[in-house]
Image (cartoon, rainbow, N blue to C red):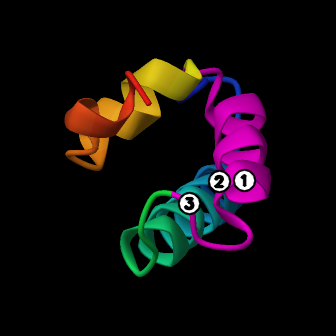
């Protein structure tokens, strides 16, 4: 989450890291090697749930399996 107490440099670094993690996940498919690790890293970094991230990737149909 954005924090108004962060400097502009910190905000930029946060956004760049968040976007890089999302991009890596978008290149993968559910079940690919490394997906779970990236999901966990992005969830911890952004304070989102795993389900929110899966839905953001359009992987809703894979949540059940």
Dot 3: within a 10 Å radius of its alpha carbon, few (fewer than 14), some, or many (20 or more) residues?
few
- Alpha carbons under labels 3 and 1: distance apart: 33 Å
Secondary structure found at label 3? loop
* Crowd rating for badge 1 (residues with CA inside 10 Å; few <14, some 14–19, many 20+): few
How many marks can you see? 3
- Which residue is depicted at the point 41% across and 68% down? 29
Residue 1 visible, this orientation: no
Any part of residue 40 in sight: yes
Image position of 54 (left or right of 41)? left
Q: Find the distance from the CA under tag 3 to the CA under tag 2.
A: 27 Å
Q: Which residue is mark 3?
A: 31
The furthest residue to the front: 65
Q: Residues within 10 Å of mark 2 (few under 14, many from 20)?
A: some
The picture places residue 25, in percent across and down from the top left corner, at 49, 66
Asked if residue 21 lies left or right of residue 38, the reply is: left
Q: Please say whether residue 3 is one of the residues in the magenta stretch.
A: no
What is the x, y in percent for residue 5? 69, 24
Residue located beneath label 2 in the image: 14
Q: On the image, numbered disc 1 is attached to which residue?
A: 10
The magenta region covers: 31-48
Q: Is residue 18 above or below residue 55?
A: below
Q: Does residue 42 belong to the magenta stretch?
A: yes
Instruction: Name the spot of residue 4 as percent of width and height, x first.
Output: 57, 24
């Amino acid at each position: 989450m954005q924090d108004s107490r962060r400097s502009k440099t910190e905000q930029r670094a946060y956004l760049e890291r968040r976007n890089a993690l999302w991009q890596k996940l978008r290149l993968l498919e559910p079940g690919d090697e490394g997906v779970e690790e990236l999901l966990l890293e992005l969830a911890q970094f952004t304070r989102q749930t795993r389900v929110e991230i899966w839905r953001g990737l359009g992987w809703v149909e894979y949540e059940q399996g």
